[in-house]
Every structure is written in structure tokens, then in C-alpha cells.
Amino acid sequence: MKRLLPKLAIFIVGVIAGASATAVFIGDRVDVLYLENRVLKSQLTAAEKDIQQLRQQKRNPAGVVSKISSRVSFSQDCDFTEYEKSTVEMTVEKKLREWLKLVVGQELDTVNYQLVPRIVDNREIEVEEKKIRLKVELVVISENVTVYLEVRPVKKQS
């Protein structure tokens, strides 16, 4: 019995250490999959809304703004983690669609191309208790309006 007890203790410690290491490795992968799932759900919701709006419009799809998307870059003074960056990108995409919903369905000839940057440029939003400012770099207006943005953190005033 005295010989068996130390071997059993070593075995149990090994099982616990192995289970802990496995949990750490799997936990990281679960976080990545969770983020991907959130992004895909957000894209699916946006696509469903776009389809619903287009069905309601019942216009000729050629020459009509049908989608709004964004390309987000981060300034050099942003020290966000990858998780925070993906959350910021999703939030910015959602807010951008909300702000520019009046453009969807308009004919390309009638879209006020100066309106889009004025609506979005220098807007401040809060994402996970961090304030950020959006700087419009470029707006491409076609059937898919694409807004290229730079995200800058807002310095807290003392």
C-alpha cells in the first residue's frame, strides 16, 4: 500500500496538469470561434435587412444603392487587443449602417456624395467603455457604398 500511494498521487497530479493544459489550449480556440460567430451573425443580420429593404423598394436594382460596408483601420496610437479591434469593427459597421440607412435605395444619380463623409467624419462612439473617434479617409459610392475609416482613441481629459 505504501508503494502504491506515491504512484497514485503522481498519476492524479499528471491527470490534473494535463486537463488544465488542455483547458487552456481549447479556451483560446473557443474565444476565436466566439468572435467569428459574432461577426457572422452581424453580417447575416445586415444581409437580411438589406434583402428586406430591396424587396420593399421593388425598384430596378441597377443603379440603386443596395449595401453599405466599411473598411476599418486603426491609428498607430491604438493599443487595442485583437478582441477589442474586432468588437470595434462590428460596432462601427453597425453604427455606419444606422447612420447611412437613408442612402440605401437611392438611385446613384441622386445620392449626395458630400453627405456621407459629413455624417460620419469625426463622430465619437463608445465601445466597451472606450471612446473612439472615426476619421473618414475615403468614400466609394456605387451600388455598394464603402466607407474607409480610421479609428482613433479619444484621450481622456483630466
Image: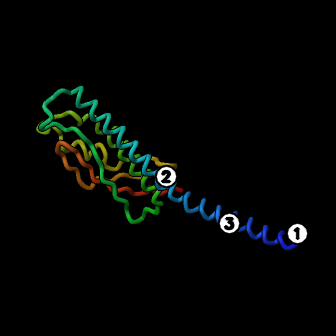
Q: Which part of the image, by quadrant, shows the C terminus? A: bottom right
Q: Residues within 10 Å of mark 3 (few under 14, many from 20)?
A: few
- Kind of residue at disc 3: Ala
Q: Which part of the image, by quadrant, shows the N terminus? A: bottom right
What residue does disc 2 label? 130
- For marks 1 and 3 on the same chain, the one whose residue lies earlier in the sequence: 1
Cα separation, mark 1 vs mark 2, equals 60 Å
Task: Give 62 or 133, whichever is nearer the viewer.
Answer: 62
Q: Which mark is residue 1?
A: 1
108 above or below 29?
Answer: above
Percent position of residue 93, x then y: 35, 46
1 above or below 156?
Answer: below
Q: Residues within 10 Å of mark 1 (few under 14, many from 20)?
A: few
What residue does disc 3 label? 17
Mark 1 secondary-structure assignment: loop
Residue 12 vs residue 141: left or right? Answer: right
- For marks 2 and 3 on the same chain, the one whose residue lies earlier in the sequence: 3
Residue at the extreme bottom of the image, as rendered:
3
Q: Which marked residue is nearer to the observer: mark 1 or mark 2?
A: 1
Percent position of residue 102, x then y: 26, 34
Percent position of residue 26, x then y: 55, 58
Residue drawn where x is 74% and y is 65% of the image: 12
- For marks 1 and 2 on the same chain, the one whose residue lies earlier in the sequence: 1
Cα separation, mark 1 vs mark 3, equals 24 Å
Residue 125 vs residue 31: left or right? Answer: left
Percent position of residue 120, x then y: 31, 46
Residue drawn where x is 59% and y is 62% of the image: 22
- Kind of residue at disc 2: Lys
Q: Are marks 1 and 2 in contact (CB under 8 Å)?
A: no
- Kind of residue at disc 1: Met
Task: Give 76 or 27, whichever is nearer the viewer.
Answer: 27
Mark 2 secondary-structure assignment: strand
